[in-house]
Image: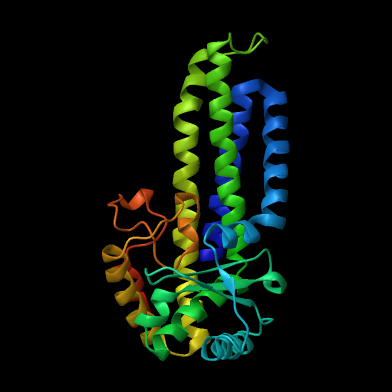
Amino acid sequence: MNIFKTAALMTGLTLVLLWAGNALGGQSGMTIALVLALGMNGFSYWFSDKLVLKMYKAKEVSKAEAPELYEMVRRLSRKADLPMPRVYIINQPQPNAFATGRDPEHAAVAVTTGILRLLDVEELEGVIAHELAHVKHRDILIGTVAATIAGAVSYLATMAQWAMIFGGRDDDDGNPFVAIVMMIVAPVAAMLIQMAISRSREYAADAGGARIAGNPSGLADALSKLGTASKQIPMQAEPATAHMFIVNPLSGKKMAGLFSTHPPMEERIARLKSMN
């Protein structure tokens, strides 16, 4: 069901992109939109993992440097039938974690120093298993593509604004009303769909992580602690990368459900407890 929902949402996001391109420049606008999306996705596919790890000053650690964490990741990777990912630690007091990488062979798992201090072994196993489930489901690539297409729609909306200022389209099919609607509606629609994709993949990763760890309660207890701590301990995080973390690093800021990158914490915990 989650796979079907994600596919439907990705299709909807692509249609928004094509509609925005068509509203901006007809057939040529749609071509520009597709080329833009392909180019941005290609860049994201190859470089997004390096960029986000550098953004948060993540330090790769070896078995000698972090033996317990490294062995935990290795053991759970084997249970998930995944290659051993690279392991990183981020020097941040907020307890959090994320996975990145274009595919299982190029994956990385990053945890903050805060999460290593807060969680016990079973809870941390649940978090690591959740991130490995993202890797197994290729959610990192899905999320990157979704964010890139949403960014392309916003870029087209900005182009439309400048086109309106400097005289609009040259062809006879130009419709100022359609262009105005596109400038307002398309970026919002793209953002809502992108966030819906993120929420759907979080539910799937929770369920997958519970199966990998073999203990839904560990992840449920971890989420309860992380949800409370994320509201109390601030983190300097980029909104564009918030969807990558196991809990929203910006959750101290109130957001309506539709505009949230993560499902309600209470619902995530309830679903995990129902698996026991």
Residue in view at x 52 percent, y 91 percent: 68
Q: Nearer the viewer, residue 133 or 172?
A: 133
Is residue 128 rendered to the left or right of residue 218? right
Residue at position x 39%, y 75% in the image: 114
Where, by quadrant of the figure, is residue 226 drawn?
Answer: bottom left
Drawn side of residue 217 relative to residue 90, left or right: left
Q: Quadrant of residue 104?
A: bottom right
Q: Please provide percent x and percent y for residue 162.
A: 56, 18
Left or right of 35: which side holds 253? Answer: left
> What colouring style does the render use?
rainbow
Q: Nearer the viewer, residue 143 or 44?
A: 44
Vertical order, 16 against 235 (above or below):
above
Q: Is residue 233 above or below residue 74?
A: above
- Residue 56's spot in the image, x, y percent? 52, 61
Residue 58 appearing in the image: yes
Image quarter of residue 45: bottom right
Q: Position of residue 192 (x, y in %)?
A: 44, 45
The structure residue drawn at horizontal position 42% and vertical position 70%, both measured from the top left corner, is 96
Q: In what quadrant of the picture does the C terminus appear?
A: bottom left
